[in-house]
Structure formats: structure tokens, C-alpha cells
Image (cartoon, grey):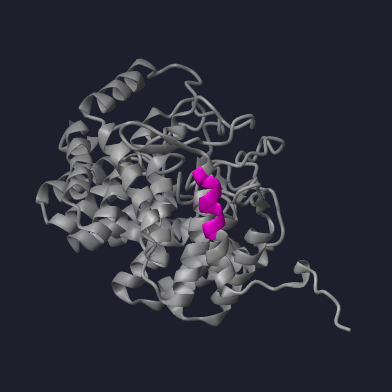
């Protein structure tokens, strides 16, 4: 007589990744709030100790709001061809269009930045409110992706207006342009990349000209590194309570690796080799502070350019770890075909695996379920690397990550959620967020990415993978 096989003995098959994404969509729908203009979603369910009062929790943003969740539903439609998911994405976009921000949004925040200049421990980086994760251009990213799927002119027009308003908001000094005191890729530099995305779409030179002038503003903050190469001072870590005067971030979101990505996309747009040279100088700096061996490397979370590298601390995600730091190398490999760039991508990926990802947690890979810092970002990355290289080991890494992500999810009364500690320094605050960069939509979106690669289905990419 055969024995019943417990579900815990089951191994996940390809269709389980789509099934889990669909179950996550059901749970996100439980957090839906209908408005006259469209739909939004609660950032987290009632009664949970989620983050409140922060600009990153805008109900329209890609990070935690309707733009990102709408993007998830767009991906789900592209995989399933079930129009109910496209309708969700369009209702999310309708809400965004009804809440469009004009130049006053930028001027008000620029006024706050000016008012706090010189204040000790200002602690707020207002300029991040302009960026690709939480600002109007994050909404433009989603609208453009929706336009490419639907060919609806209103979404295209909205995406272009976000670029136009961003150009208008620029502060020009000595033939250079900036928007805020946040020069990292999450701040002004990400806005420049968005302009280059729009330039690629439209061919309108004003976007390229603004991007070039803004790049020259950031170049003023370049510094020679002790071990060779160039690093960039991108914002005041003392004011942000993230370090002392001799502390800088290193990696993609807030460090020089993100600046290298900016130079790579400016090189693509202009064909001017000075940008390639600037990226190479950053790579020289990163090599000078790297840890690892001939097969695997990591860059530290932070650096101290004057007193030298001091902390054996490494983020392992997209924002402050090897995933994001591989993006400029990947971009230049795609532009030049030079294998040296792909070799560095592979070494950074191996750094992840040698560090125990995805199974083992550490200081820089904690119990987060967000796209930025946790397993969803790792899954998106390995799926993309498999798609890029065809190397079966990345497929295996992606499967391990996808299986771990599903096993860490929670079966709700209706649907499936992902509980995690978004904030590394507050591990007791465990919340099931809904949004794309912060929660369930991004986790399920990464499962869809893996599924789409396995099934050879083309789906939309978000900022870090788009240009």
C-alpha cells in the first residue's frame, strides 16, 4: 500500500514560480484601495509595524506605491495574457496620471534643501525624492513600460512630461546642471539616466544636452584614490547619519559604482570616450579596495579614503552589494563586447555565491524580502545572468534562490505574502510590505522574471535592467 507523500517532500517545478506570483497578486489585491481616479494599495496591512512618514512610501512611487505594483501586474499580464492583470496596471496608471506633479514639486523640495544648508545633522536627503525609485521619474518609468505594451498615447505623453519637468527643474550654474545635493544614482544621477532613456526613445537633443551638463556637475566631485583610480563624493554621510567625514559609500545605489553606470550610459549616448575613461578610473578605484581572489570578489559597503579601508562589512544585494556594482561592467560589455567586463560581472556574481547567498544570512544579507537588499534582487540578477550568458550555473543559482524565496513566503487566508525586516538595523520590525522595491510585488516580480527566462517570454524590465 502506497504512503501519502507530504508536500514538504515536493521539489518546485517551473509552473510553481508562476503559481506563487499569482498567489502573491491575490494577496496584494486584498490590500487594494479604490479611488475615484484609479487604484492604490496599502503599503502594508493594517495593524503591522511598518515604516510610516517617509517620502519613500509615496502612494505613487515605484519603490512602495502604485507605479511599482502596477509594473508587477504588467509583468503578470505579459506572462499570462490574462487581461484582468493589465486592467490592474492601467488603473494604477490612471491614478498616477491624476496626481501628476508639476514644477512646484521640485521647487518646494529645492527650497527645503537650501533652507537646511549648513545645518548640522540635517539627516534628510530631500533630493532622493526626485529619483528613479520614489520620484516622478519613477512613475514615468512605469508609464513608459505600459505604453510599450499597450501603445496608449496617454502613457507615453506622461512619461515624456516627467522628463520635461525634470529638465525644467534643473538648476544651471556655469554651464553645469544639478537638481539637489544627492548626486548618487538614487538621486540626481538616476534622473540623468532617465533623461538618456527618453533621449534614446525620442532623439530629442535637449535631454542629451541636459544630461551632459549634469554629468559635468557630478564630475566636480571626483577625487583621486590612494590605491589608484577615482572615487566620487556623492552626498554628506554625516548629515545623513551614515558615517563620519571620512566615509563614503562604494556600490551602486549610493556610491561610485553607480557613477560608473552613469558614465557608461553617457558613453553609449554620446560615443565620447572621456566617459569610458571615467568609468575605467572608477573600476581602478574599486579594484584597489576589493576583497577576494582570482575567482570571486566583493567591494566593501563603505570606504574611508583618508584613513583607509577599515571594516570587513559587505552588503550582498542590489543597492549596496555586488549585484548593483556589476551593472556598469555589464553595460560596457554589451556596448564594447570586451570580455574583461563580463569577467568582472562573473567574479562579482561568484562573490555572492561564495558568501553563502541565497541560503545563508549575514550582516549584509539579512532577513529582508525586498528587491533592493534581499533574495528578490538576487533572483532577478541570476535570471538575468542566465539570459545574458546562457551559462547553466546561473540557471541553477536562480533556481536555488527562487526555491528559497517561495519557502520563505507565507500562506495567507487569501494569497501569499513575504514577511521581512526591511531595515537592517531594526531586525525586530518584521512586516509584509506590498510594494516593488520594498516587498511582495518585487518578490513575485522576480519569480516572473525567472519564469519568463525559462519560457523565453519577453517581459518589461525596471530601471536597473532597462537601458
Q: Residue at x 37, y 44 (%)?
A: 67
Residue 431, x across and y down, in percent: 63, 39
450 left or right, relative to 35: right
List the single residue furthest toward the front: 1
Quadrant location of the N terminus?
Answer: bottom right
Which quarter shows the C terminus? bottom left
Measuring from the top left, give residue 414's x and y in whole percent: 61, 48
The question of residue 26 being in magenta is answered with yes
Q: Is residue 315 magenta?
A: no
Q: Is residue 9 above or below residue 175?
A: below
| Residue at screen point 67% across, 49% down | 366
Number of marks in picture: 0
Say if residue 322 shows up in the picture.
no
Residue 99 sits above or below residue 147 on the image: above
Name the main secondary structure of what is drawn in magenta.
helix
Tell me which residue sits at (75%, 68%) in the image: 7
Q: Is residue 336 above or below residue 196?
A: below
Q: Which residues are magenta?
A: 21-29
Amino acid at each position: 500500500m502506497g504512503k501519502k507523500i507530504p508536500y514538504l517532500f515536493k521539489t518546485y517545478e517551473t509552473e510553481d514560480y508562476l503559481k506563487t506570483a499569482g498567489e502573491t497578486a491575490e494577496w496584494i489585491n486584498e490590500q487594494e484601495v479604490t479611488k475615484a481616479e484609479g487604484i492604490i494599495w496599502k503599503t502594508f496591512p493594517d495593524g503591522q509595524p511598518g515604516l510610516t512618514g517617509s517620502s519613500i512610501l509615496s502612494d505613487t512611487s515605484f519603490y512602495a506605491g502604485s507605479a511599482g505594483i502596477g509594473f508587477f501586474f504588467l509583468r503578470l499580464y505579459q506572462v499570462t495574457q490574462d487581461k484582468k492583470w493589465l486592467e490592474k496596471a492601467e488603473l494604477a496608471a490612471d491614478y498616477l496620471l491624476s496626481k501628476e506633479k508639476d514644477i512646484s514639486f521640485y521647487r518646494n523640495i529645492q527650497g527645503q534643501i537650501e533652507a537646511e544648508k549648513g545645518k548640522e545633522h540635517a539627516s534628510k536627503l530631500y533630493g532622493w525624492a526626485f529619483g528613479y525609485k520614489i520620484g516622478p521619474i519613477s512613475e514615468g518609468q512605469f508609464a513608459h513600460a505600459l505604453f510599450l505594451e499597450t501603445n496608449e498615447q496617454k502613457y507615453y505623453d506622461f512619461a515624456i512630461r516627467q522628463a520635461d519637468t525634470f529638465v525644467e527643474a534643473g538648476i544651471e550654474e556655469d554651464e553645469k546642471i544639478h537638481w539637489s545635493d544627492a548626486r548618487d544614482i538614487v538621486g540626481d544621477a538616476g534622473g540623468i539616466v532617465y533623461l538618456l532613456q527618453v533621449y534614446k526613445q525620442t532623439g530629442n537633443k535637449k535631454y542629451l544636452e541636459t544630461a551632459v551638463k549634469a554629468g559635468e556637475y557630478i564630475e566636480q566631485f571626483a577625487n583621486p584614490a590612494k590605491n589608484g583610480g577615482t572615487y566620487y563624493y556623492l552626498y554628506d554621510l554625516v548629515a545623513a547619519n551614515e558615517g563620519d567625514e571620512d566615509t563614503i559609500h562604494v556600490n551602486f545605489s549610493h556610491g561610485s559604482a553607480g557613477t560608473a553606470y552613469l558614465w557608461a550610459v553617457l558613453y553609449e549616448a554620446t560615443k565620447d570616450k572621456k566617459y569610458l575613461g571615467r568609468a575605467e578610473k572608477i573600476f581602478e578605484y574599486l579594484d584597489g579596495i576589493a576583497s577576494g581572489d582570482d575567482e570571486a570578489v566583493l567591494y566593501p559597503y563603505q570606504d574611508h579614503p583618508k584613513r583607509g579601508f577599515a571594516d570587513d562589512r559587505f552588503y550582498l544585494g542590489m543597492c549596496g552589494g555586488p549585484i548593483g556594482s556589476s551593472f556598469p561592467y555589464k553595460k560596457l560589455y554589451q556596448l564594447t563586447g570586451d570580455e574583461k567586463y563580463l569577467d568582472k560581472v562573473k567574479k562579482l556574481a561568484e562573490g555572492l555565491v561564495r558568501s553563502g547567498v541565497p541560503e545563508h544570512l549575514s550582516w549584509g544579507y539579512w532577513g529582508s524580502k525586498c528587491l533592493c537588499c534581499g533574495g528578490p534582487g538576487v533572483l532577478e540578477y541570476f535570471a538575468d545572468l542566465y539570459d545574458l550568458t546562457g551559462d547553466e550555473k546561473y540557471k541553477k543559482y536562480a533556481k536555488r534562490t527562487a526555491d528559497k524565496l517561495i519557502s520563505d513566503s507565507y500562506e495567507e487566508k487569501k494569497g501569499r505574502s513575504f514577511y521581512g525586516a526591511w531595515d537592517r538595523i531594526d531586525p525586530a520590525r518584521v512586516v509584509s510590505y506590498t510594494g516593488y522595491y520594498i516587498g511582495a510585488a518585487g518578490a513575485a516580480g522576480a519569480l516572473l522574471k525567472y519564469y519568463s527566462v525559462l519560457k523565453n517570454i519577453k517581459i518589461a524590465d525596471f530601471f536597473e535592467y532597462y537601458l
